[in-house]
Amino acid sequence: MSTSYREIVDKIREASAAGDFDEMFSHFTPDATFRVIGNHKFSRTCSGREEILSLFAEVLSMLDHETMDRHAGPWGVGEGVLYEEYSLKCKTTKGKDYINEYVMVYRFEGDKVSGMVEFMDTDHFVKAVLEV
């Protein structure tokens, strides 16, 4: 593999931030999955581009993009896997403060992401983003 897992994840993040979802999904297998761990309305496993984009759009519509501040934390690589920790701070579209810690696990098939699993403080997410 000529591109490292870290480089691939960085390209995905850059494309996502730019709204270039064709570029973002060029780094995924066609049947890639995205699983959100927790017990709230977004907790589920999405399969394929359309389901993943639908979930992203719904969640991101509740966060104020102008205030987003993402801080990278530790990350590591294993065979076919990359994990990363990061924090996200922003306002919700309702004006509430939102600060949360995340762990994202990426699974790879060759140089393509075949699955992602997101872990976060779901209780805080529900209180800050979903409750009125």
Image (cartoon, grey):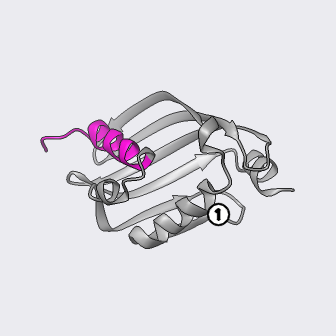
Number of other residues with Cα within 10 Å of mark 1, as a class: few under 14, some 14 to 19, many 20 or more = some
In the picture shown, does residue 81 fall above or below 70?
A: below
Q: Position of residue 119 (x, y in %)?
A: 58, 48
Give the residue at x 34% y 39%: 10
Toward the front, the furthest residue is: 66
Give the residue at x 31% y 37%: 6
Q: Is residue 105 left or right of residue 128?
A: left
Q: Is residue 43 left or right of residue 10?
A: right
Asked if residue 34 is among those painted magenta in the image, a careful observer would answer: no
Q: Which residue is mark 1?
A: 42
Considering the whole magenta stretch, tell me its main secondary structure: helix
For label 1, the SS is loop
Identify which amino acid the numbered label 1 is placed on: Phe
Q: Position of residue 77 (x, y in %)?
A: 33, 36
Give the residue at x 77% y 53%: 126
Magenta stretch: give its range. 1-16
Q: Is residue 118 left or right of residue 125?
A: left
Q: Position of residue 51 (x, y in %)?
A: 48, 71
